[in-house]
Image (spheres, helix red, strand yellow):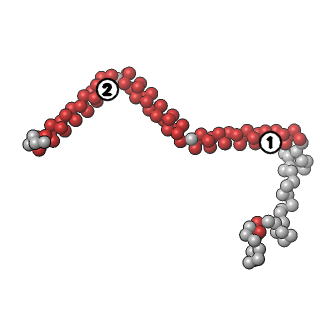
Amino acid sequence: MTADEPTGASLVPSADRSLPPSFGSPAPSGNGSTPPSREELRREIAETRTDLADTLAALVAKGDVKARVGGELTHLRDRATRTVNRRPVLLMTVAGALVAAVVGAIVWQQTRRGGRR
């Protein structure tokens, strides 16, 4: 690139930097000697469009953080609900232990301070 050449000018092919001879020519079909038929091209284009649509859908789904988090929260809520429905005694035990821990902490703090407020 020279000083008087505009930025990006080196990206444009010139006479000494031409594109390869195969650029822009149709890709050979299975046997390598005949170009693909219109029907083959249409089929390939349809397959490519389907692949691109699938890829785009996957990228959109991956990028939709709100939907992914919502789905995960729904899954966790359903799992917790199933656990509670199957084991209500476990829920009562955990709740009782939590209440006992909070009451114990309050009592301990009050006795440590000597009952002063």
Q: Which image quadrant for residue 84?
A: top left
Residue pictured at 89% horizontal, 42% vertical:
37
Left or right, 77 with respect to 58, comes to: left
76 or 7, which is in the foreground? 7
Residue 63 in percent (x, y) is at 58, 44
Q: In which quadrant is the N terminus drawn?
A: bottom right
Q: Which residue is denoted by mark 2 in the rendering?
A: 91
Residue 86 in percent (x, y) is at 37, 22
Precedes in sequence: disc 1 or disc 2: 1
Kindly state the secondary structure of the residue where label 2 is placed.
Answer: helix
Left or right, 85 with respect to 92, comes to: right
Residue 113 in percent (x, y) is at 11, 44
How packed is label 2: few (under 14 Cα within 10 Å), some, or many (20 or more)? some
Q: Which residue is denoted by mark 1 in the rendering?
A: 45
Residue pictured at 90% horizontal, 50% vertical:
33
84 or 29, which is in the foreground? 84
